[in-house]
Amino acid sequence: MTWQKTRKNNDLTGAPEKVLSAALAYLAKREYSELELCGKLTSRGAAEDDVAAVAAVLKEKRYLDDGRYAKAYVRDRREFRPCGAAMIRRELAARGIDAELIEEALAEEYDEEQQREALRRLLRKAAANAPDNDEAMSKYRAKIVRRMLSRGFPQSLVWDEIAILLTSADR
């Protein structure tokens, strides 16, 4: 006999009184955007009108705030998983955050100098593995540039910083 978790208490179908407590349980663990929280509740079977009512109550009491979520998300990406502002914009938009709130969060939490410092941290790690010869260094530099551009850093910023950091790694 194998042990399995039962999902009886996890289902919100036909239980509008449980939707608020489930939403509060999610929000007690971390910040959610309104779209994310509503998606989690509806995926558990809650009726859309119950979810909308709960979301309205939570927004009124400021337990659910997309602006606060966007700022926390930007801080997290800046400190723990560095990437450029372009990538953060895409990720927040995919989470249902309004463009105005995204720009406000980026302006407040991730200016160009902070973006430059995050890029420098990533490039320092890359410079530690830089090859010795010129041909290999040229290929390595191109690889690092592509990687940083794919992470959403502006091209001019990447070229400026890579010229400074990887040039010093050349031997």
Image (cartoon, rainbow, N blue to C red):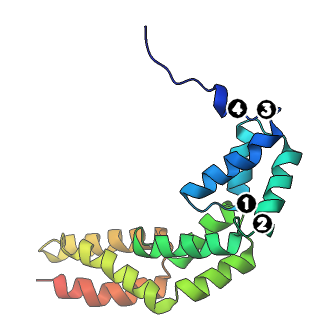
Decide: is 132 above or below 18. below
Q: Is residue 85 left or right of residue 162?
A: right
> What amino acid does circle 1 point to?
Glu
Looking at this view, name the residue that lies furthest to the top.
1
> How many residues crowd mark 3 within 10 Å: few (<14), some (14–19), many (20+)?
some
Contact check, label 1 and label 2, Cβ < 8 Å: yes
Which badge, 1 or 2, comes first in the chain's sequence?
1
Is the C-beta separation of discs 4 and 3 under 8 Å? yes
Q: Which of 16/151 is in front?
A: 16
Label 3, label 1: how many angstroms apart (C-alpha)?
A: 20 Å
User: What is the three-letter code of the residue carrying label 2?
Assistant: Lys
- Residue at screen point 67% across, 61% down: 94
- Quarter occupied by residue 127: bottom left
Residue shown at the point (77%, 66%) measured from the top left: 59
Q: Residue at x 47, y 69 (%)?
A: 151
Which residue corresponds to mark 2?
Answer: 59
Label 3, secondary structure: give it: loop
Q: Position of residue 53 (x, y in %)?
A: 86, 54
Image quarter where the C terminus lies is: bottom left
What type is the residue that disc 4 sits on? Asp
Q: Is residue 52 left or right of residue 171?
A: right
Q: Using the numbered discs, state the Cα–Cα distance from disc 4 to disc 2 in whole angstroms.
A: 24 Å
Horizontal side of 146 relative to 88 (left or right) equals: left
Residue 34 numbered tag:
1
Q: Quadrant of the N terminus?
A: top left
Q: Nearer the viewer, mark 1 or mark 2?
A: 2
Q: Which residue is mark 3?
A: 13
Judged by depth in the image, the label closer to the viewer, 4 or 1, is 4
